Image (cartoon, helix red, strand yellow):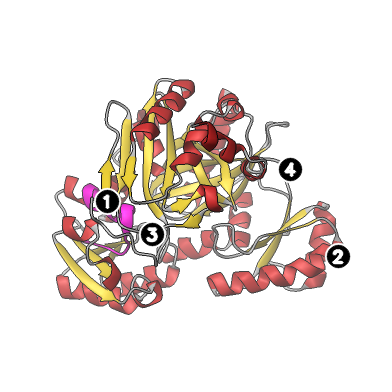
Amino acid sequence: MTIRKLLIANRGEIAVRIIRAAQSLGISTVQVHSEADRDMLAVQMADEAVCVGPAPAAQSYLSIPAILQAARDTGADAIHPGYGFLSENAGFARAVVDAGLIFVGPDANTIDRMGDKAAARATAIAAGVPVVPGSKGRVEDAAQALTAAEEVGFPVLIKAAAGGGGRGIRIAHNAGELARLAPQARSEAAAAFGDGGLYIEKLITNPRHIEVQVLGDGTDAVHCYERECSLQRRRQKVWEEAGAFGLSTETREALCKSAADLARSVGYRGAGTVEYLYDDQSGDFYFIEMNTRIQVEHPVTEMVTGVDLVAEMIRVAGGAPLSITQDEITVTGHAIEVRINAEDPLRQFMPFPGKLTSMRVPEGTGIRFDHFLYEGYQIPPFYDSLLGKLIVHAPTRDQAIDLMAEALGSLELGGLRTTTPLHKALAADPDLRAGRIHTQWLEPWLEQGNLTAAAEEA
């Protein structure tokens, strides 16, 4: 079925990105929005816009009945969930299909299977993908958790079986900590995801976080190579690169092939990401989870491969086979993305919504800024603080870092405090440039006052 009218069930920069992809395919668009987002750029860009509720996301962007009604009222035949909100909600995917509409993403059974971390782990093992040692499935009580932890050896991660974003995770170094922290993790997971299920995983010390972009049409699947996502604060990604630095050709090929094999084994449809921990010391990699949606950091992959991931997932959802084969996907140069958030990094990353009084966007070869901003726009305080993503592409990683520093110097978002000072300091850091980073690197770097020192020197 060819998609004629696409409803975007999201907001902010990803809504703008989806509208642009749909326009490139000749598809008309419907943008849903909350009362707080009436003036959002995506609302102005879309062919039609429908208010689906008040500011709280639970009454608007998370309201399945309101979104389906908007689709019916406007004659939309497909819904794109973007990332976050309902993007990995199997119930929403089922409701969309039951309403006679197309869900732009994998089917609900795949979301269920890969969204449950324990089930995804079992699926990865069956597909021959290496996994971090851990429990064979969910742990239902304290006794099971202790048995699993003793089998893999402390320290261990206590992880939510459902959901992601770093929530529901605790580190236990011994049996006493496990007994104390597991109930906390269970409660947090239940509150965040409506599912308090847990599983146990061996803690890999100072790993890197590497993920592989996959595309599937339900029959075949390809990978679009890997991304480096090790710079994280509170388990939230801050700075992302394509590709990952310092990998051998053999490791890169094995990593990417395993991701495509996994996607193929579940009949994956759409764009997805397979995430791994990489041990620099041993060169081993381990599957940790699959995100069944488009990722925030997808632009760096687009920059190095030339593949429009959002347009491809819309085409596939409409029934088309993949338009590219694996041997047609190649990598050119290196790309970096930084997340520009409305937060003050010099004041403990305090949220800073406000009015954008002036705006200057860097331009030039290899520079891209995905955003939803315009001068005079009032940033609402109700949602994620992401304002936009600054992306650069250059022949080498060193040149990309230099270009990022230059682009950050040209970015002006007047009237707001943003995370730009953090990214400027990171771009100047010798450890980052040398690749001496891992998932536990950034928080101690901040605690040691490196950001404050860099800001004082600027």
Q: Which residue is mark 1?
A: 357
Q: Residues within 10 Å of mark 4 (few under 14, many from 20)?
A: few
- Indicate which label's residue lies in the foreground, 1 or 3: 1
Mark 2 — residue? 176
Q: CA distance from mark 3 to mark 2?
A: 42 Å
Tell me the distance, in whole angstroms, between the alpha carbons under discs 1 and 3: 12 Å
Nearer the camera: disc 3 or disc 4: 3
Q: Is residue 446 positioned above or below 164 on the image?
A: above
N-terminal of the pair, mark 3 or mark 4, is 4
Q: Which residues are magenta?
A: 4-21
Q: CA distance from mark 1 to mark 4?
A: 45 Å
Q: Residues within 10 Å of mark 2 (few under 14, many from 20)?
A: few
Tag 3 residue = 353
Q: Is residue 397 above or below residue 338?
A: above
- Label 4 sits on a secondary structure element that is loop
According to the picture, the residue beneath numbered tag 4 turns out to be 205
Looking at the image, the residue that sits furthest to the front is: 456
- For residue 159, which quarter of the picture? bottom right
**Label 1 secondary element:** loop
Residue 255 is situated, as x and y percent measured from the top left of the image, at 56, 36
- The x and y percentages for residue 193 are 54, 70
Residue 264's spot in the image, x, y percent? 47, 47
Callout 2 secondary element: helix
Q: Is residue 440 above or below residue 178?
A: above
Q: Amino acid at mark 1?
A: Thr
369 left or right of 384 in image? left
* Label whose residue precedes the other's in the sequence (2 or 1): 2
Give the secondary structure at mark 3. loop
Residue 107, quarter of picture: bottom left
* Residue sitting at x 72%, y 68%: 139
